[in-house]
Amino acid sequence: MPPELIVGLPGTFATPGFSSALHPDPEPVSPPVLVARALSRDFGLRHAVREVSLTLARGEVLGLLGPNGAGKTTTMQMITGNLAPTAGEIQICGIDLLDHPTRAKARIGYLPETPPLYRDLTVDEFLRLAARLHRVPKARVVAAVAQAQRRCGLTDMSARRIGALSKGYQQRVGIAQAIVHEPDLVVLDEPTVGLDPNQIREIRTLIRELADDHAVILSTHILPEVETVCDRVQILHQGQVVYTDNIAALKQYRGGHALTIALRRPPGVEDLKGLPGVRNVETLSAERFRLFHEADTDPAEALVRRSVERDWGLVELTPVETTLEEVFVHLTQSDSAELPAP
Amino acid sequence: MIFTIAAKELRALFNAPLAWVVLAVLQVILAWIFLVSLDRYIALQPQLVQYPNPPGVTEFIVAPMFGSGAVVLLMLVPLLSMRLIAEERRNQTLTLLISAPVSMTEIVIGKFLGLALFLFAVVALMAVMALSLIAGGKIDFGLLAANVIGLTLLGGAFAAIGLYISSLTANPVIAAVATLASLLVLWLVNMGAPDPGSVLHLISLIKHYESFAKGVIDTGDLAYYVLLIALFLLLAARRLDRDRLAS
């Protein structure tokens, strides 16, 4: 989805405390799939989640990003009714989750961090059970199970016992379980953790497909994952939302502004500094350097040309990927400047 | 929805070898008791006819067999009830039920019904064994029915207590041991109370079974089991709900 479509979405509030500003918003025609306002959850004295607000419309994929222990899982457990929030409210398609839990839960599909699979059942049996539990009418169960299996690529595995499946297929069964009743909201907690790269790619493709007719929330601590599958991202840090925006804006933060290079016959540091756009040079070893550059100029091309001209022997050129932690540091430091004030 | 969960529990029981082993062992033990008392009845029959009102074959064979069945159930139910919630909690599969549009009460009642149906099958097999006596004589259907009802209720009470204890822990073995201990305590609690009016008789699991064994369906005893089952199911549902709320 191009960014301009996302920016204007109704009710996209960014920071804690913003919920009061929601009031003057015009009522949308159909309520968003998920509205969570100022969710907080304490465990004893520890504030696991503080004032987290989320809004999600059909067709969107929202990424919840954060390091381990940031409150992603707690937030998802609250949205799916597995955990009661200490404060805040949750509406699924306009139905209050806390007041009408069964009606609201019928519209949610949830894949927890550990997929809740009965290992003794076959894929077919398990998905039929999941469909029945989610109140799929008896007459439609077989069709619903077949469709979920088709979407998750499980058709050939339908008669296999879940316990005998590989981790990747078990994960797919977990996702199939979450979508078998055609929920409005699909909540996936770390759906790609522990999978091999091929499986990760398949699952990501599947999630993108799901977004066609569901609203999807997924959590991850892997930055590139958010970029490939999500339309919007909320970054949680120590239980609070530190960043809400579309993906394009995140990419800017993440863009690096640094290159790691290795040269067989390095010139002096001054020569490197003379490259256009280079702000600073850090010497990593005799042959390896890190070039810091301005956000809008990439000195890579000039560097390669000069390396050939002057025979520096360029053997490595890697853009430095900003880690999640660095993004956090950046975000928390630039808090007042770049985020709308609460 | 309750029946979906009950059916799932029954299926889980029969998917594992435990249920089959339990059924087989139970049948062997009870058949042995049945055979021995039948043997004794045949040996004693010539003397019994001299009494003015001799005990019938049902009273002589079936009631003691159901009494032994009660003891066997006491030991078996903890093995069957331990996994109901504790194992789901350990395997983190409880999330499937809690995320589904199902209330905690429905989850608990469904799980209870699943196990109760299994126990009813055990009792039904015993009834079939007793009915085989028709081949050689007349049996007292009223007494048999009272025994079936009594043992089913007793098994239900065991199951409800086991289910509640299973909801307290994530370790099935601990659930099994604690359930067995609790059942034994509730079974034997009136042993040291010679006074027939003692409150200990009131809470004893076995005391209320005695009238059923004699063929009497006492509403008080009936109410005791029904209330006991309801109480522990309610406690289990509250315990599950507390997982969601606890801090």
Image (spheres, coloured by chain):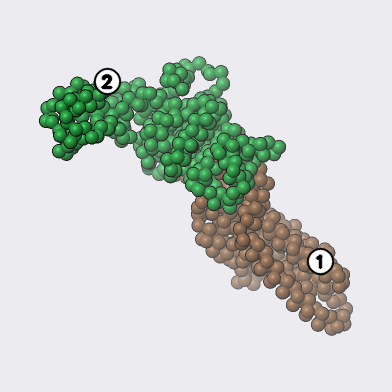
Chain colours: A green, B brown
Q: Chain of mark 2?
A: A
Q: Which residue is the site of mark 2?
A: A296
Give the answer, above or below, for where A235 lies relative to B30.
Answer: above
Q: Are marks 2 and 1 in contact (CB under 8 Å)?
A: no
For the point 60% across and 41% down, the residue is A155
For the point 59% across and 49% down, the residue is A160
Task: Please tell me in which quadrant of the rendered image residue B71 appears.
Answer: bottom right
Q: Is residue B123 left or right of residue B85?
A: right
Residue B90 is situated, as x and y percent measured from the top left of the image, at 50, 52
At numbered mark 1, what does the secondary structure look like: helix, strand or loop?
Answer: helix
Q: Is residue B70 left or right of residue A59?
A: right
- Residue at mark 2 to residue at mark 1: CA–CA distance: 91 Å
Q: Which residue is the site of mark 1?
A: B131
The disc at residue A333 is none
Q: Is residue A341 left or right of residue B21?
A: left
For the point 35% across and 21% down, the residue is A340
